[in-house]
Image (cartoon, coloured by chain):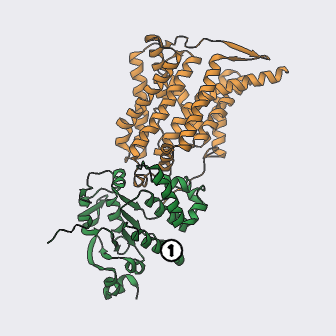
Amino acid sequence: MSEGIIYWLQQALNALQLGSIYALIALGYTMVYGILTMINFAHGDVFMIGAFFCFLLSSTLNLTFVPTLLLTMIGTAILGVLIERLAYKPLRQAPRVSAIITALGVGMFLENFTLALAPYPKHIPMLLENVTWNFYGITLSSIQLVIISLSLGLMLLLDYIVQRTTIGMAMRAISWDKTFVPLMGIPVDFIISITFAIGAGLAGAAGTMYALAYPVIDPYMGIMVGWKAFICAVVGGIGNIRGAMAGAFILGTVEIMVVAFFPSTFRDFVAFTLLMVLIMVRPYGILGKPRIQKV
Amino acid sequence: MNKNTNLQLEVCNLEVHYDGIQALHGVSFTINKGEIVTLIGANGAGKSSILRAISGITPFNGDIIFEGQNLKSVPAHAIVGLGIAHVPEGRGVFGNLTVKENLQLATWQRKDKEAINSDYEHIFTLFPKLKLRARQLAGTLSGGEQQMLVVGRALMSRAQLLLLDEPSMGLAPKLVQDIFSIIQEINAAGTTVLLVEQNANMALRIATRAYVLEVGHVVLTGSGLDLLGNPRIKAAYLGT
């Protein structure tokens, strides 16, 4: 193979890794928006808490990768449900801006709570043996392979849950119109809790995988990654699950390509500009549909 | 007074408020097993509020007793499990779900898989159009088909009491006929029906008994046929 093709395939692989992590987080934003039309701005910090859970489990309890991942996902899922029950549910009838401000507050609480307990950046121990393989000049690391395949697996699982199970059906029904869902005998609060649990669980998985790839973590790591994942969700069409996945891989690709051509400081500037242009052209996102406002 | 053993639903002094505006001022009425009871009245008389209170999606004062159980503190999703199904006004299909999924949603609390499958067949024989469109998104159905879907969906919960809010609204006269004969069929199969209708003429023809509502009060009651012949009803609701 020519050098050019090898170079591009290598970049595509890197984009896939970055996009996978964005996708796992973007799904949480889009699912919560889908059923509550609310942006959960604390979601990026749930991802950060996931990375810290991963740190605690792996360095303090010396757990290996699989139990660390599973317990982290369970931990963040419980955190997500608690956040919804304690902070958002009491405000469900309140003006939307109250819920948004509360979400920002919850995010700051999580950051500063973590900062108080862990004032210095933490190093995650090596959870996986880092092996690299070389295929015709393209290098693939075991960490990359795990991140990409696990993320794709989780996304397929989520897609199955949403499209094929009765819980997923209830989620879709709530996103269409919440008022009549109880008339089907479906407890709406339970479905909302499940949604938060799944979204936060995926953020926990993303936190663990991020910690695998970039093993130094700090309490503010969720802010930028959270914003970017939120933008992925908007670009894909907020509320649309497949859209969030598409948006994440687009942003991952853009970021990797910018770094390939420009100084790396240009990355976020170019990425955000491109995304703003895309939003101007398609305000409802790539896979989103313009919803007619019901009167 | 001898105790009525046929009594299925008893509504006592029902009051409903929306943001400080009172929609119902102490409404009382009863429904017996196997009846078709209709509530008639102008827009804003409070008919829909009564149904919403019974199915638990609107908070209320007063008492609603179904099969001896007070529904006051029962959440809406549990009321379905007790045997009350509500077909809301304006259809309320989930347009992003397929026809089959809409029907399936209503079986959320049921565990009897085989009976559920035979109920699908039953719904599809009642409404053959729905069978043809089973895999289509409900949002793509015509108004009449959507109405059939919501009635079918309510039946999937195996309700003993069916609350129907304006099932004829926006339908062509032929379809209105169809819907009313299906209501009678469902009733003949043993389901009690509480019917709210603007089309008082049709509703009174099939009703066992009727209650007339005006601005949140029951002002008149009688059998369907009596009210059809009542001059006051004729002038106010039948346009004759």
The single residue placed furthest to the right in the displayed view is A2
The answer to which image quadrant residue A128 occupies is: top right
Q: In this view, does A261 lie to the left or right of A22?
A: right
Q: In this view, does B92 lie to the left or right of B212?
A: right
Give the total of numbered labels: 1
Q: Is residue A221 above or below residue B2?
A: above
Q: Residue at x 39, y 46 (%)?
A: A187
Residue B89, x across and y down, in percent: 43, 65
Q: In which quarter of the image is the N terminus of chain A?
A: top right
In the figure, the shade used to draw chain A is: orange
Q: In this view, does B138 lie above or below B196?
A: above
Q: In this view, does B174 lie to the left or right of A182?
A: right
The residue beneath circle 1 is B178
Residue A111, x across and y down, in percent: 43, 24
Q: Is residue A175 above or below residue B25?
A: above
Q: Is residue B168 left or right of residue B25?
A: right
- Amino acid carrying label 1: it is Asp
Element under disc 1? helix
In this orientation, does residue B165 appear? yes
Q: How crowded is mark 1: few (under 14 residues within 10 Å), some or many (20 or more)?
A: some
The single residue placed furthest to the front in the displayed view is B114
Residue A256, x across and y down, in percent: 69, 25
Residue B46, x across and y down, in percent: 33, 68
The answer to which image quadrant residue A7 occupies is: top right
Could you say which chain is coloured green in the image? B
Q: Residue at x 52, y 21 (%)?
A: A208
Nearer-the-camera pick, A150 or A285 = A150
Nearer-the-camera pick, B229 or A288 = B229
